[in-house]
Amino acid sequence: MIMAIAWRITRRCNLGKCFFCRIGDKAKNSDGELSFEKVKDICSQYASSDYIDKGIKKIYFTGGEPFIREDMADILNYITVDLQIPASVVTNGTLINDNNIYSLKNSLIDISISLDGLEDVHNNIRQSKVFNKTINTIANLLENGITVDVLPTVTRCSYDSLLSDEFIRLLTKQLKGIRYIAFSQIFSLGYGKYWQSENVSKEKYKNLLQYYKKIAIDFKVIERKPKPPSLRIDCYGNVHSLSEMEGIKEFIDGNLCKSSLDSLLFPPSFFWLFNKSRYSKERIILELAYCLKDCSNNENNLSYRIIQQLNQDRYLA
């Protein structure tokens, strides 16, 4: 059963090449991106359906950097205020301005912002001097009553910074009021496929989570894992049933500029995949194995768990 709609609203980003970026090479311009009117149309189709009753209760927006779109705040307002559909946005926080914050004050939205450690570490990972802007954005969002989660990626270069007293004080004092701090390691997607060696050991990662859970008072500590089965939409309107397959033409299930949302919504089961004429078992395994190339033992990688399920699936017999 599909639990969410995950929408990569753009492949553009205003920052440099974060070495673990999940999309890899970014788009240089907005050519081909869905227009504001088309985004509204797709959201209206969602709102007028019974998807919410079936358990698909939220739309998750990612990028690139979503707020590089000048109409992103308008999109969010249309969805959360006009249609009353909750939404979530993952952002680096550097392009959210006062006008955005003012317009989102009364919306059904939560904003997740990447924060990978103290200033030198965060700026080094983001390859831009954006730490202060990111901190100010989080503080301004909280001051205006907007729900904020903080998303650190735990790597060998950020580990000590994330455990420092100064970073703890930052979270509990200056950024008091955040809802979650959601940790993750480097997923084997995009550039992350080539940087799995930068993940800390399982033991160190577990110790960090346990430490934060012990000291957390004003916020919850969670481990950020791949989302449950989702209908994934890219910025060009292509629909994918498996997030790891995004961008692979053979795994595009349709395009929302040509088909309705209703016609492309389906439970993403492996049995269904195996019985589609254009998908062979061998091709699915080949593509998933490619995703696993550099992290065959990384349990945080969705592909790893898919391979395990495939190996046990009687349809492969």
Image (cartoon, helix red, strand yellow):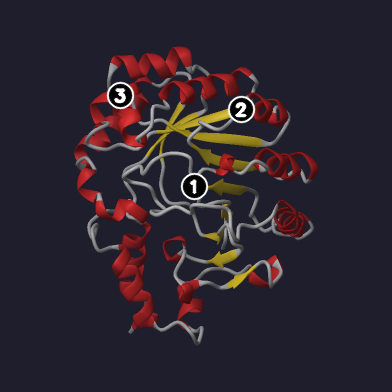
Whether 188 is drawn above or below 199: the answer is below
Disc 1 crowd, CA 10 A, few/some/many (<14, 14-19, 20+): many
User: Which mark sits nearer the N-terminus, 3 or 1?
Assistant: 1
Name the residue carrying label 1.
64
Residue 168 is situated, as x and y percent measured from the top left of the image, at: 36, 18
Give residue 307's mark: none
Amino acid on which the number 2 mark rests in the picture: Asn
Element type where label 3 sits in the image: helix
Q: In the rendering, at what x and y percent does residue 249 appear?
A: 48, 73
Q: Residues within 10 Å of mark 3 (few under 14, many from 20)?
A: few
Q: Are marks 3 and 1 in contact (CB under 8 Å)?
A: no
Q: Is residue 5 left or right of residue 20?
A: right
The residue identified by callout 2 is 97
Q: Secondary structure at mark 1?
A: loop
Label 2, label 1: how far apart the Cα atoms are:
18 Å
Number of numbered tags placed on the structure image: 3
Q: Amino acid at mark 3?
A: Asp
Mark 2 falls on what kind of element?
loop
The C terminus - image quarter: bottom left
Mark 1 belongs to which amino acid?
Gly
From the image, tell me which residue sits under label 3: 120
The image shows residue 112 at horizontal and vertical percentages of 51, 35
Note whether residue 257 is visible.
yes
